[in-house]
Structure formats: structure tokens, C-alpha cells
Amino acid sequence: MFEGFTVADVPVDEARVHVRHGGTGPAVLLLHGHPRTGSTWHAVAPALVARGFTVVCPDLRGYGRSVGPPPAPDHSAHSKRAVARDMVQLMTTLGHERFHVVGHDRGAYVALRLALDHEHRVDRLTLIDCIPISEHLARADARFATAWWHWFFFAQPEVPERVIGADPLAWYRADPRTMGAENHAEWSAAVHDPAVVRAMLEDYRAGLTVDRRHEEEDRAAGRRLSVPLLVLWTLRDDLEELYGDPLPIWRAWADDVRGHGVDSGHHVAEEAPQALVDALTSFLPVPDAAGT
């Protein structure tokens, strides 16, 4: 995977970020979801490099081979605000003052927070398979709780660690034929690490508490995204089934919103990488011959 990419472990204030990066031209930061690592982008990242972009694929704080601080009682150590700061410091270290951000699933919440807190660093934002956490919770009903029950299970103290740890592969279930053998092996190693599982659960615990509060504070203050926003959702997942067209929800958060569904299951970077690359390169400014 990632032939020609540089692999590094980059220290930031509170964590150490494991990252793959390569290419020349405008930078694109790709943020994975749960329970994946940065290797989920193994088919997307080289295709973007071939289109003239620099691509940065980190493991989020506590996921994969990135190492963060111990969990905090209020879950703030794994808040999207904290992880977004990791990403900004990472991109500064790699020499990228401004960059595009693409986030999927839990990585989309980090991407949203990054763009809200550090908007001057972001050129364009792409969010995949998500609406804001606070919007989910404001709409939560029996149908949502039945479909997304794992949010509330993961929030329980200690129990999900024991359940997942008993047999991580049975809990998460993933097909190496779809993921690719190397990506699957990296993912498998990650979910067998109790520290990684704990960090992934803290991500969800932060979502229901500190992250929700941060979003509600943004709304109360009238904060909006001014950067162009592309919203993508996978047609064989359930976001559209739950909410219909998600674009009206996002128009309450951003000034410039566009988007569409993609014919894929949830893990679009693995299941429909070409369709995702086409959607991204239709949205992101095409680098010129000088790579700018």
C-alpha cells in the first residue's frame, strides 16, 4: 500500500500522529472513520496524487498507530476539538499552511471541528456519511436509536471494552477481499489492541458529551462555515433513509453547500474508491502544471 509515500510518526502537543504522506501540489488531508485507520484510503490516496495533489493520511488520535493521552473523566482528551488541533499541528509540521480536508464517518466530525475552529487553514471541506452530532441527537427517536444503538452502547463505562475485547473480529466483522489484504491486516492489528479500542470508545463518549456541547455553543453563537462544503453520503447506508436529503440540514451550518449520494456501502474509500476520487476531483480545484 501507499507506494512512494513517506511514513512517519509526528509529535504534536498531546499526542504522536502516525501518518503517510506523498505527492506534490495542493494538500488534501484525509481523515478516516471508525474503526478504520489511515490505510482505509489506500486506493484513494495514490489516485489523488496522480491527479496532482499532495495527500496526507493520518491515524486519528488513539486509532491505529497514533498515540494520545489517557482518557479524561470528561472525555475531552478525545474530543473532536483536541483531535482537530492534532491535525492542524501535523499539517504545520509537514509544511502545509492551507489545505483541503476530507473526513468520513468519525473523521468527518473531526473535519467539521477543524474547519470551525481553524477556518483560516482550510480551503475546501468534504464530509462523508454524516450530519453534525448535535443534529443527530436533536432528531433522535426510536428509529435512530435502533439503527445507531452502538452510539449509546459505546457510551457505557467499561462494558463495551469487555465485549469487544472478547472477540474483536467477531464484533467488527470486515471482509479482507473488500478491504484489501494489507489494509485488513493493519485494521485487525489495531482492533486487537485494547488501548486502541479504548480510544475509539472515548471518541464516541466525547461525541455525546463535550462534542455535542461544542456544536451547540457554535449554533448559539451563530458560527457558520464559510468554506465551500461538499457533502457526500453512501446510498447503501442509512443516512438518507433516516433524514432524507441531508443537504438542507447542512445549509443551516454552511454558506456554500453542495453534494450528492454515492452508490456504495458505508466504507466508500474501500468499496467505491473511483467514484469517491471522481467526486473529490470534481470539487477540488485542479492543480495547474506548476502543481498549485
Image: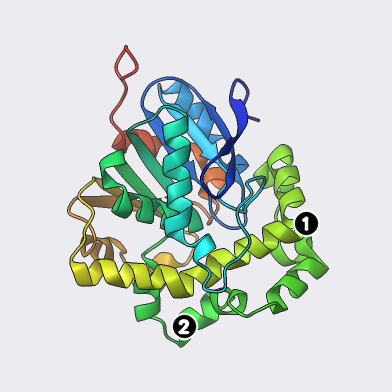
Image point (53%, 55%), residue name: 265
Residue 135, quarter of picture: bottom left
The residue beneath circle 1 is 192
Quadrant in which residue 18 is drawn? top right
Residue found at the very far top of the displayed protein: 289
Image side of residue 150 versus residue 137, left or right: right
Residue 155: x and y, percent?
Answer: 58, 77
Q: Residue furthest right?
A: 166
Out of 164 and 223, give the one closest to the viewer. 223
Give the residue displayed 66% in from the left and 46% down from the top.
Answer: 178
- Residue 234 visible to an observer of this rendering: no
**Quarter of the picture holding the N terminus:** top right
What percent of the width, then of the height, locates residue 20? Answer: 58, 32
Q: Residues within 10 Å of mark 1 (few under 14, many from 20)?
A: some
Q: Determine the secondary structure under disc 1.
A: loop
Of the numbered discs in the image, which one, if any, rests on residue 13?
A: none
In this orientation, does residue 93 appear? yes
In the image, 170: left or right of 129?
right
Give the spatial CA distance, label 1 vs label 2. 31 Å
Q: Mark 1 or mark 2, which has the lower sequence index? A: 2
Across and down, in percent, residue 175 comes to: 71, 52
Question: Going 42% across and 67% down the picture, which residue do you hit?
Answer: 211
Which colouring convention does the figure follow?
Answer: rainbow
Asked whether the residues under the numbered discs 1 and 2 touch, taking CB atoms below 8 Å apart as contact, a structural biologist would say: no
Can you name the residue that lies furthest to the bottom here? 142
Residue 284 image offset from top left, x and y in percent: 31, 34
Of residue 281 and residue 113, the one placed in the foreground of this image is: 113
The residue at the point 37 percent across, 56 percent down is 113
Q: Nearer the viewer, mark 1 or mark 2?
A: 1
Secondary-structure class at tag 2 = helix
Where does label 2 land, which residue? 143
**198 or 51: nearer the eye?**
198
